[in-house]
Image: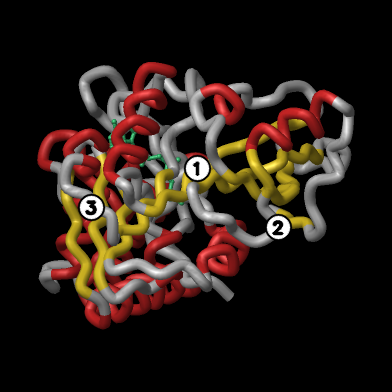
Amino acid sequence: MPIVPPIKSQGIKTKLVKWIASNIEDVKYERWVEPFMGTGVVGFNIQPKKALMCDSNPHLIKFYNGIKNKEITSTKVNKFLTDEGAKLLKSEGEYYYEVRNRFNDKGSSLDFLFLSRSCFNGMMRFNKKGGFNVPFCKKPNRFAQALVTKITNQVKNISQVIELGDFTFKHQDFKTTLAEINHSDLVYSDPPYIGRHVDYFDSWSEEEEIILHEKIVSSNATYILSTWLNNKYRTNEYVFSIWKDSFITTKEHFYHVGAKESNRNSVNEALVSNVNLKNSIFTREMDTKIKNGDVQLTTAKVES
Ligand SMILES: C[S@@+](CC[C@H](N)C(=O)[O-])C[C@H]1O[C@@H](n2cnc3c(N)ncnc32)[C@H](O)[C@@H]1O
């Protein structure tokens, strides 16, 4: 079982960490660097001795720095969610919006956790002014004892991982992070998909992907990029243009849209790297494979 972080987000890589970890087993590096840490699930499962974890979303960084400096402890989280959960239940759910306003005013990390675990579908989305704007999941009894215990344990597990390693969390743009890297780092990048999100802290363009590529390559660090390769409708052509001189390895990932079994889609997830990962081939060979209609890319499947 992977270590699951207490914060949720739509782009979370929980189902892929085992595969990612197996691909870097033999890669040697001194420091793990994530310019786009998100929930941090990848780095927290890799458990490097030394790590630099960054994101443009200040709330994520504040939350993990709070765990690191023990302002946020599992005991505090347990009491907070029990007390606030009781208010949520009593108000028949209306209290969610009070917490959301309070968070958008003051930015407390405990309120951030409360919202992340009681909003619709565990989504993370901010409006043009940087305000969290996801609606309530409509379950007034959301923070029942079992969930509070689960989240408390997740906070405990993450704080143990942070305590065992030398973790630095920084709120900064990826360009600043990439200006701090060197040849002995392993840089794991999981940027937003190009054109997919329009969010205050989370949008991504072709220009930014080009800068990411240029800065990583010129640093001589080992890099691994998480991205998608194709689904039954589309292929991510950036893999063959921007990342044309790299290796690629893929895995088929199934996900459900809605509750129906028939709404089951698959996407080929990819790891693109300057080192020869397990089962990897050159991106240009993959380009040829796809053009020839050969999409038998993966051996195992991941369900989510
Ligand atoms: C796909 S998510 C990362 C998911 C993460 N690997 C996980 O499993 O939780 C992309 C992250 O990039 C961050 N981000 C977007 N634009 C950024 C930028 N210009 N600089 C740094 N981080 C950025 C977003 O806030 C988001 O957390």
Image color mode: secondary structure
Residue 261 placement, left or right of 29: right
Q: Amino acid at mark 1?
A: Gly
Q: Residues within 10 Å of mark 3 (few under 14, many from 20)?
A: some
Give the residue drawn at x 56%, y 30%: 244
* One can see residue 122 in this view: no
Q: Amino acid at mark 3?
A: Asn
Is 4 or 109 nearer to us in this picture? 4
Disc 1, SS: loop
Alpha carbons under labels 2 and 3: distance apart = 27 Å
Q: Which residue is mark 2?
A: 279
Give the residue drawn at x 42%, y 76%: 149
* Quarter of the figure with residue 232: top right
| Ligand 1 within 8 angstroms of badge 1 C-beta | yes
* Residue 21 image point, x, y percent: 53, 67
Is 141 or 211 nearer to us in this picture? 211
Indicate which quadrant contains ligand 1: top left
Q: Which residue is mark 3?
A: 182
Q: What label does residue 102 carry, if any?
A: none
- Tell which circle, 2 or 1, labels the residue nearer the N-terminal end: 1
* Residue 199 image point, x, y percent: 36, 24
Asked if the residue at tag 3 contacts the one at tag 2, i.e. Cβ–Cβ closer than 8 Å, the answer is no
Asked if the residue at tag 1 contacts the one at tag 2, i.e. Cβ–Cβ closer than 8 Å, the answer is no
Alpha carbons under labels 2 and 1: distance apart = 24 Å
- Tell which circle, 1 or 3, labels the residue nearer the N-terminal end: 1
Q: Residues within 10 Å of mark 2 (few under 14, many from 20)?
A: few
Disc 2, SS: loop
Q: Which residue is mark 1?
A: 11
Quadrant of the drawing holding the N terminus: bottom right
Q: Amino acid at mark 2?
A: Asn
| Ligand 1 within 8 angstroms of badge 3 C-beta | no
